[in-house]
Amino acid sequence: MRTILEDLYCGNITPNEQQMTPGSELKRAVDRVTKCENQLMEQLEETEQETLTKLIRSQHEINSITATENFILGFRLGVRLMAECMDENDGDIWTGGE
């Protein structure tokens, strides 16, 4: 536990900077998107390329916001699960000492 807290304090925990596994489903999907993007760019005029670039950047922004929100929601759910696990007086059978 101390190591995780030290890593958090030192800024060594960055869940948004994960590496893709070569050959994974995600990597293949990213490669397909990149290929399609490059093909579209070749077919478009300069002003249309700018519009496509703005669209792609906006989608990246949406994805980043969504990932952040999902991380926070998942973390909060984990904390609620841990808090409930610590509540010994929530059932029909009391496990206390008296």
Image: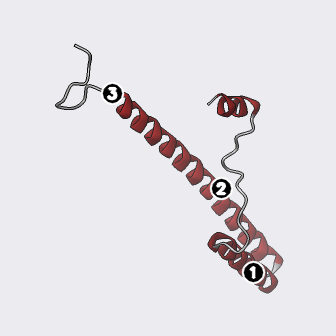
Asked if residue 76 is positioned above or below residue 95 in the image, the reply reads: below
Q: Amino acid at mark 2?
A: Glu
Of all residues, the one furthest to the top in this rendering is 98
Which of 42/88 is in front?
A: 88
Q: How is the image coloured?
A: secondary structure
Residue at point 48%, 44% (across, down) = 73
Neighbours of disc 2 within 10 Å: few (<14), some (14-19), many (20+): few
- For residue 61, the mark is 2
Which of 65/4 is in front?
A: 4
Q: Tell me if label 1 and label 3 are in contact, CB under 8 Å.
A: no
Residue at point 75%, 68% (across, down) = 53
Q: Which residue is mark 1?
A: 35
Which of 31/49 is in front?
A: 31
Q: Quadrant of residue 85?
A: top left
First reached walking from the N terminus: tag 1 or tag 3: 1
- For residue 78, the mark is none
First reached walking from the N terminus: tag 2 or tag 1: 1
Real-space Cα distance between discs 2 and 1?
A: 20 Å
Q: Which residue is mark 3?
A: 87
Q: Secondary structure at mark 2?
A: helix
Viewed as shown, does residue 40 lie left or right of 86? right
